[in-house]
């Protein structure tokens, strides 16, 4: 792993800047209207905070093996899943960079997202067979950090994404090749056949998209039926993982083995 974050000009399709972070950068998210980027460094127990205008970097210790990261909608808090002494969630103040951690949550926590009204966190986890957090989604108050609900998913819920309208939570269950969809109003779930996917679902103007790591494709998922409605090959991909979309419905897919980003036009 390079320990770097690359900045790509999407017009010229070239790397225009390389930013040094710390060991084994794992996840990245933007906050403050795109003015800050937060990168979890799995190997060094830190989050790198990047000023996206000046490329200045600061590193904040958050706990052992940080995995996923999300910024609250109001930009005040940064939530990070960590794996440290039963403190499975780190909360960073986005202004002061002070860090606190929450005990008694899923072990180990994997992925996290936040509701559209900032009131609830959705954290996926796996644990020993028969435990309360084995292959589960924990719904947590972002104010009191009390557990509101524990919802069973399929095997190894690797990624969690709240839909743009806040009515659904999409949980990619990598080992089961299933997609669990939670209705946030009724707290009911449905499970759908899916693809081998570790990364998060992302949303376009109409439907959702994910990476099929086995077939090396971007799959389009209907947000109505939750079925796969279209597949777009990723030419030259070795091990595609994460995907993001731009405003023109171009998908940018990271490749774990080739250290490349593939660009695919999707529907």
Image: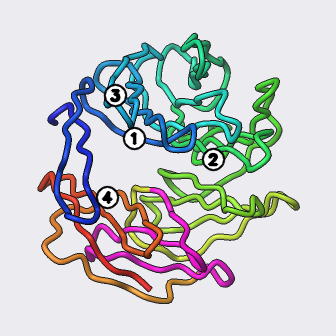
Name which residue lies at 37% across and 17% down: 59
Screen quadrant of the C terminus: bottom left
Indicate the quadrant where residue 95 lies: top right
Q: Earlier in the sequence, mark 1 or mark 3?
A: 1
Q: For mark 2, does the 10 Å Cα neighbourhood hold few (<14), some (14 to 19), or many (20 or more) residues?
A: many
Q: Nearer the viewer, mark 1 or mark 2?
A: 1
Mark 4 lies on residue: 241
Q: Is residue 105 magenta?
A: no
Question: In the rendered image, which residue does mark 2 sit on?
Answer: 136
Label of residue 50 in the image: none
User: Callout 4: 10 Å neighbours few (<14), some, many (20+)?
Assistant: many
Residue at point 22% right, 28% down? 20
Of mark 1 and mark 2, the one earlier in the sequence is 1
**Residue range (magenta):** 200-226
| Label 3 or label 2, whichever comes before in sequence order | 3
C-alpha gap between disc 2 and disc 4:
22 Å
Secondary structure beneath dot 2 equals: strand
Depicted 188 relative to depicted 248: above or below:
above
Q: How many labels were placed on the picture?
A: 4
Q: Position of residue 15 (x, y in %)?
A: 17, 51
Gap between marks 3 and 4 measured at Cα: 17 Å
Q: Which residue is mark 1?
A: 27
Q: Secondary structure at mark 3?
A: strand
Residue 107 sits in quarter: top right
Q: Which mark is residue 41?
A: 3
Secondary structure category for the residue under label 1: strand
- Viewer-nearest of discs 2 and 4: 4
Work out which quarter of the rendered image holds the N terminus and state it. top left
Which percent across, then down, holds residue 37?
43, 36
Secondary structure at numbered mark 4: strand
Q: Residue at x 58, y 20 (%)?
A: 92
């Amino acid at each position: 792993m390079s320990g770097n974050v690359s900045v790509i000009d999407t017009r010229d399709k070239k790397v225009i800047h390389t930013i040094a972070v710390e060991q084994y950068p794992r996840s990245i998210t933007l906050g403050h209207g795109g003015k800050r980027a937060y990168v979890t460094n799995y190997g060094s127990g830190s989050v790198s905070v990047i000023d996206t205008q000046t490329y200045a970097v600061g590193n904040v210790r958050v706990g052992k093996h940080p995995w996923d990261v999300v910024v609250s909608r109001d930009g005040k808090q940064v939530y990070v899943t960590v794996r440290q002494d039963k403190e499975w969630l780190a909360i960073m103040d986005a202004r002061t960079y002070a860090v606190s951690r929450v005990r008694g949550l899923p072990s180990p926590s994997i992925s996290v997202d936040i509701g559209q009204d900032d009131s609830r966190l959705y954290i996926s986890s796996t644990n020993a067979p028969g435990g309360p957090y084995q292959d589960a989604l924990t719904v947590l108050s972002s104010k009191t950090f009390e557990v509101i609900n524990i919802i069973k998913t399929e095997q190894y819920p690797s990624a969690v994404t709240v839909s743009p309208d806040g009515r659904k939570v999409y949980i990619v269950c990598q080992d089961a090749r299933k997609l669990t969809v939670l209705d946030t109003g009724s707290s009911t779930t449905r499970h759908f056949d899916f693809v081998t996917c570790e990364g998060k679902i992302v949303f376009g103007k109409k439907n959702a998209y994910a990476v099929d790591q086995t077939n090396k494709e971007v799959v389009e998922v209907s947000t109505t039926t939750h079925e796969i409605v279209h597949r777009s090959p990723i030419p030259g991909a070795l091990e595609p993982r994460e995907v993001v979309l731009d405003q023109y419905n171009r998908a940018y897919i990271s490749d774990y083995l080739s250290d490349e980003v593939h660009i695919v036009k999707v529907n």
